[in-house]
Amino acid sequence: MKTPFYISLFLLFAIDNGFSQDKGYFAVSLGPSFPTGDFGSKDINNSAAGLATTGAIFDLTFAQKFGKNFGMTIILRGQANGVDAQPLIDELYNQSPQASWSADSETWGIGGFMGGLYGSFPMDENGKANFETRAMFGYISATSPEITVYGNYLGTTFWVRTESANAGAFAYLFGAGFKFNLGKHLCILTNLDYLGATPEFLDVATYSSIGDYQTNSYQQKYGTVNVGVGLGYRW
């Protein structure tokens, strides 16, 4: 008569032990970053155009459940997006076609820390595949690119350079993805998220080869859709 009792006790222990192995995780992820809106605009007549191109993200993510499906998560993100300077060159050529034009540019950069809530919902009976969502808020440090435009007319070269600048800003991130458990502790994660922020760059210097110098302050609205794939350790 004790056999059913021991079997029930074993099953309860096994179930509880199975859940205890999926209470949270730490993961490293990377993937492409696609600029949207003003940040990705190449319209030279748009004063808010960021001229940003497809870049990359690198994430360190920690997640811990409070219960069966919901918990807290924090993320350290590094992100870089290039700059397409061709619209600047095309505009200068339209204004002065008798000169030759070129440009050098660095990248837009972001380093940020965000935290928030996430949900994890099993997609099969074994809990090996989970659909996850997250909503996060935090702070980023943004770096604008240094851009130098060169011109040459009748053998004379001249240039105009806008310096890089740094700014901090509130940021938000909303995303969803999947977690696939591999064995007892490892997992693979895929994520799709949107990151938004509007840093204000103050007193950005612009100067030229002929000695002109001025400063300008401006806001740049960041908006990127990011895809991440990573490897995690779960518990």
Image (cartoon, helix red, strand yellow):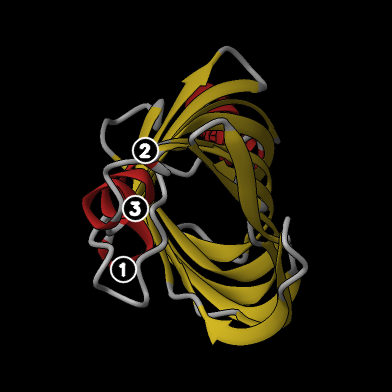
**Of 10 and 21, the residue lying toward us:** 21
Sequence-first disc among 3 and 1: 1
**Of 92 and 52, the residue lying toward us:** 92
Residue wearing tag 1? 38
Looking at the rendered structure, the secondary structure element under dot 3 is helix
Rendered image: mark on residue 130: 2
Sequence-first disc among 2 and 3: 3
Looking at the rendered structure, the secondary structure element under dot 2 is strand
Q: Residue at x 29, y 46 (%)?
A: 93
Residue contact at pointers 3 and 1, CB within 8 angstroms: no
**Of 148 and 221, the residue lying toward us:** 148
Q: Residues within 10 Å of mark 2 (few under 14, many from 20)?
A: some
The residue under label 1 is which amino acid type?
Answer: Asp
Distance between mark 2 and mark 3 Cα atoms: 52 Å
Q: Compared with residue 162, is residue 167 higher up or lower down, i.e. above or below?
A: below
Q: Residue at x 67, y 53 (%)?
A: 146
Residue wearing tag 3? 92
Please state which of the two labelled residues, at mark 1 or mark 2, is closer to the viewer.
Answer: 1
Instruction: Tell me the quarter of the picture where residue 203 sits.
Output: bottom right
Sequence-first disc among 1 and 2: 1
- The image position of residue 37, as x and y in percent, is 26, 65
The residue under label 3 is which amino acid type?
Answer: Leu
